[in-house]
Image (cartoon, rainbow, N blue to C red):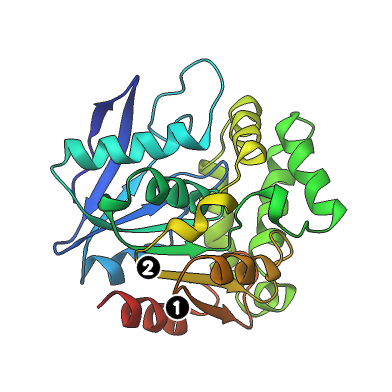
Amino acid sequence: MTMPRIQVNDIAIYYELHGMGFPLLLIAGLGADHTSWDDNLIRELASNFQTILIDNRGAGGTDNPEGSFTINYFAADAASLLNKLGISRAYVLGHSMGGYIAQQLAIDHPEMVAKLILCSTTCGAKHSIAGPEHATQGVLDRAYGRLTDDQIIEMRVKHNFTEEFQRANPDAIQRFRRMAAKNMVPPEVYGRQLKAMVEFDSFPYLQNLRMPTLVLHGKKDTSPLPENAEILAKNIPGAKLAYFNESAHALYTPEPEDFIKILLDFLL
C-alpha cells in the first residue's frame, strides 16, 4: 500500500494505492475522506484492481486552500492525480458528493473514465427530488457549526444506516462511530463543500456520457431519495440501475455480498 501526497494544481493531495490491476478510483462524499471506506470493501477491491483512494480538497490529508470550492475543482484534482500517477484510464466510483465529482470527471474527461459507478447520489439539486426537511436542516446546522462532535456522529449514523441495521449490528456501528470521530472536517470546510454541491448541475450533460455506467442506491436512503437514481439512470444512455432494499445511504456495509457481486459483475 502506498500513502503519499502529491502536488496537483494548487494543492498537495493525499492518496492511497491498494492492490494491483486495472485502476479503480474511489471518491468519497461530503465531509468525508479515505477513512470513510469500509476496510473490508477496500480489501475486496484490492484483490481485483489497483484501488485508488483520494482525499478531496479540504478533507483528510489533502490541503485546505482558501477560497471557494467547486465540483469542477474536485474533478480537476482527481484528473490531475491520475495524470501524475501515469494513469490514462480508470474505473471511477463516487459516493454521494463523490458521485457529483465522478460525473464531472466523466463530463470533462470522458477519455479517462472507462466505466462509471454512481452510488447514493444525484445529478444536482435543480433536477432532483429533495429529501425531508430535517435532513436538510441537519446538514445546514453542521455547516454553520451548530452541532457538537457527538451530534455530528449521531447524524451520520442515522443517515447511513437504518434503525434495523443499527440494532442488529452494534459492532459495525461502533466501528463507524470511531471512524466518524477521526474523520471530522471543520464546519467551514464542510460548508464550502456543501456550497459546491448546491451549485452543481450535471443534468444537461448526462446524455453525452457514453461510458458504461452503473447507478446504485439504497431503497431506504432519506437523502438523497432513491427516486434520484432513476433520474440518473434514465438520462445516461445505457446506464444500469440497481437498488439495495435494506440499505440507507451506506451501501456496502449493510449488504456486502450483494454490493460486491453487482459491482464485480459490472466491472469484470
Name which residue lies at 60% across and 45% down: 201
Name which residue lies at 58% across and 80% down: 244
Does 192 appear above or below 94?
A: above
Q: Do the residues labelled 2 and 1 touch (CB within 8 Å)?
A: yes
Residue type at mark 2 is Leu
Name which residue lies at 70% across and 74% down: 220
Does 157 appear above or below 60?
A: below
Image position of 29 (left or right of 50): right
Name which residue lies at 57% across and 65% down: 232
Residue closest to the eye, 224 or 169: 224
Quarter of the image with the C terminus in it: bottom left
Q: Can residue 171 be seen in this view?
A: no
How many neighbours does mark 1 have within 10 angstroms: few (below 14), some (14-19), or many (20 or more)? some
Image position of 180 (left or right of 42): right
Which of the two discs, 2 and 1, labels the residue nearer the N terminus? 2
Q: Position of residue 139 (x, y in %)?
A: 74, 43
Residue type at mark 1 is Phe
Residue highlighted by disc 1 = 259
Measure how far apart labels 2 and 1 are at the Cα level. 9 Å
How many neighbours does mark 2 have within 10 angstroms: few (below 14), some (14-19), or many (20 or more)? some
Q: Residue furthest top?
A: 66
Q: Position of residue 233 (x, y in %)?
A: 55, 70
Residue 159, labelled with which disc? none
Q: Is residue 159 visible?
A: yes
Does 105 appear above or below 67?
A: below
- Number of numbered discs visible in the structure rendering: 2
Q: Position of residue 218 (x, y in %)?
A: 62, 73
Q: What element carries label 2?
A: helix
Residue highlighted by disc 2 = 41
Q: What element carries label 1?
A: helix
Does 53 appear above or below 121?
A: above
| Residue 48 picture quarter | bottom left
